Amino acid sequence: PLASIGMSCFLDAVREDFKEGFSVIDYGCGAGILSNFISSRLQHFEYLGLEPDVQHGWGRIALGERYFNDPRISFGTIGPDFEDRIKRKIDAIVLISVFTHLALADIYLTLDKLIRVFQDNPKCSIVFSCFIGEEAKVRNPEPHIGPRFYGESIITWRNLLAYCEIHQLNLEKHMDFTAAGGFVHSIFKITRP
């Protein structure tokens, strides 16, 4: 039930596009739980779940392909050819709890990659969650997991707003969502003017 509430919070940000024919990229998809949520609400949709091209990502994709064997659902890796593979209409790119684990520089790099998808999809939205605080900082309570894994990454509203102003994008705070463990995720939406 909590997962369903979380999925609906993200898709509510693109409710005007969430209808038959909806096309979404789930960037950092894990095992693709969002695809199951969408399939229970729409008959016609396209879902592409993407994970990093590393062993952990391959395992998550394999799990998703095993559980969500459906022609409307596909999985792939985030590699250098990412943008070349996205040559179709995309209504939304969703990042569920991805930026909560990336340092600010990596958030900017990811957004740089994703806004290039806008070139072919002027009505596409990027919907993501992050932890907002007074200052940008990263806490890494378990450094043995890996050098690029952060237990908690906090960014500021000013960080997001400055990025969007530089790239001439619209930024809208959609809502706050309290996830498991009591963590408050702020959900944002980026669009082109």
Image (cartoon, grey):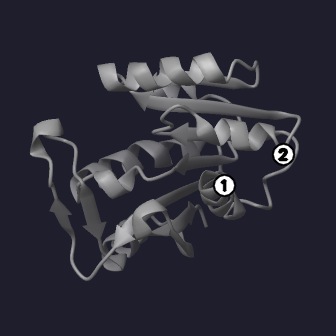
> Is residue 68 shown to the viewer in this render?
yes
Could you tell whether 17 is left or right of 75 in the image?
right
Q: Quadrant of residue 22?
A: top right
Nearest the eye: 91 or 181: 181
Q: Residues within 10 Å of mark 2 (few under 14, many from 20)?
A: few
Q: Quadrant of the N terminus?
A: bottom right
**Residue at 50%, 51% in the rendered image:** 96
Nearer the observer, 18 or 151: 151
Residue 41 x %, y %: 84, 45
Residue 165's label in the rendered image is none
**Marked residue nearer the N-terminal end (2 or 1):** 1
- Give the number of the disc on residue 1: 1
Relative vertical location of residue 102 with respect to residue 48 in this rendering, above or below: below
Amino acid found under the numbered disc labelled 1: Pro
Whether residue 81 is visible to the viewer of this picture, yes or no, is no
Q: Secondary structure at mark 1?
A: loop
The residue drawn where x is 52% and y is 21% is 63
Q: In the shown orientation, is residue 20 left or right of residue 23? A: right
Q: Position of residue 11 (x, y in %)?
A: 68, 56
**Mark 1, residues whose alpha carbon is within 10 Å: few (<14), some, or many (≥20)?**
few
**In the foreground, 91 or 59:** 59
Name the quadrant of the C terminus. bottom right
- Most foreground residue, 10 or 140: 140
Q: Residue at x 29, y 69 (%)?
A: 155
Label 2 to label 1: alpha-carbon separation: 15 Å
Residue 156 lies, in percent from the top left, at 31, 75
Q: Is 109 above or below relative to 100? A: above
- Residue 41: numbered disc: 2
What percent of the width, then of the height, locates residue 170? Answer: 54, 70
User: What is the secondary structure assignment of the residue under circle 2?
Assistant: loop
